[in-house]
Amino acid sequence: MAAAAWVFVMVLAIIVITCSNASIHDLRPRPGFGGHLVDCLSWRLAVETNNLRNWTLVPQSCENYVGNYMLGKQYSRDCKAVANAALEYAGSLNLTGDAKDIWVFDIDETTLSNLPYYARADVQFGALPYNNTKFNEWVAEGTAPAIPSIRYLYKKLLSLGIKNVFLSGTNARFKEVRVANLHKAGYHSWEKLILKGEEDKGLSAVAYKSKRRTELVKQGYKIVGNIGDQWSDLLGDNAGSRTFKVPDPMYYIG
Ligand SMILES: *[C@@H]1O[C@H](CO)[C@@H](O)[C@H](O)[C@H]1NC(C)=O
Ligand SMILES: *[C@@H]1O[C@H](CO)[C@@H](O)[C@H](O)[C@H]1NC(C)=O
Ligand SMILES: *[C@@H]1O[C@H](CO)[C@@H](O)[C@H](O)[C@H]1NC(C)=O
Ligand SMILES: [Mg+2]
């Protein structure tokens, strides 16, 4: 009896040691980001919390990690968690009922997803340098899908009597194709669609979005909520009574 128990313990110990070695190996940081070792989950956390700023590329060693995150279940779960938090907040609001309550939505990677573009072999989820010409060709196709949980939020806000405003850094020359794309993706009504015009040229993302939000407030609107995938959507003047950050480990806009 004692011998059998001893054998059992030994076998268990061997299994435990084998498994923990395997997981230590899996979790070992992989080299490749400016010569530093990168743990991709830590990198993503640093990105989402805005501890890491002005980064230009996804570390090459994290391309697979970011790809798996974006295409797997976790990204959509994380978006859903953001949308649920926003809905819980919106439901708790004491709305004025004067039709001046608005919610600001960023477009790219918030309202619409460019994942079909970012998953391409010549983009590699942001591990290869950004090519403006190529990205604009994709925008001009007007086929970006919705992020379903954010579209759900958009519809629920409408039913609560909150009006939605799209505020995007996209150049105003894409207005027609963006409107068509929004319709195709299931977004059918909005109070305003604000795109970057000539007068916004040279402004940083934070300065541009602050300026446009301040205009909204001067027009008498109350920004009860603001949602975006970039910190530059959520920082600056008149950011809104509350802000919500959608995950985006593929690019950074300062
Ligand atoms: C990031 O870029 C912005 C705008 O160019 C600059 O103001 C800021 O200091 C930079 N931050 C870091 C941490 O380098
Ligand atoms: C909601 O706002 C109205 C008008 O300001 C106020 O009279 C009322 O007490 C508020 N209700 C709650 C639950 O805060
Ligand atoms: C950017 O993309 C365009 C269109 O595909 C291509 O012609 C150009 O060579 C690319 N530029 C760079 C620097 O890769
Ligand atoms: Mg965006």
Image: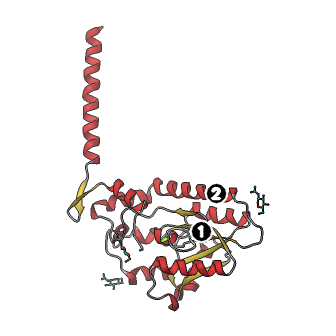
User: Where's residue 201, x and y in %?
Assistant: 47, 88
In the displayed image of the protein, which residue is found farthest to the top? 1
175 relative position to 92: left or right: left
Considering only order in the chain, which callout, 1 or 2, is on the residue closer to the N terminus? 2
Which image quadrant for residue 57?
Answer: bottom left
Which image quadrant for residue 15?
Answer: top left
User: Where's residue 88, x and y in %?
Assistant: 64, 54
Residue 66 - label: none
**What residue does disc 2 label?**
89
Point 41% across, 57% down: residue:
69
Q: Amino acid at mark 1?
A: Gly
**What residue does disc 1 label?**
240
Query: From the image, which quarter does the N terminus lie in?
Result: top left
Which image quadrant for residue 223?
Answer: bottom right
The residues bearing labels 2 and 1 have C-alpha atoms spaced at a distance of 13 Å
In the displayed image of the protein, which residue is found farthest to the bottom? 198
What secondary structure is found at the residue carrying circle 2?
Answer: helix
User: Where's residue 52, x and y in %?
Assistant: 36, 64
118 relative position to 87: left or right: left
Q: Amino acid at mark 2?
A: Tyr
24 relative position to 112: left or right: left
Neighbourhood count class around disc 2 (C-alpha, 10 Å): few under 14, some 14–19, many 20 upward: few
Dots 2 and 1: beta carbons under 8 Å? no
Point 41% across, 63% down: residue:
50
Neighbourhood count class around disc 1 (C-alpha, 10 Å): few under 14, some 14–19, many 20 upward: many
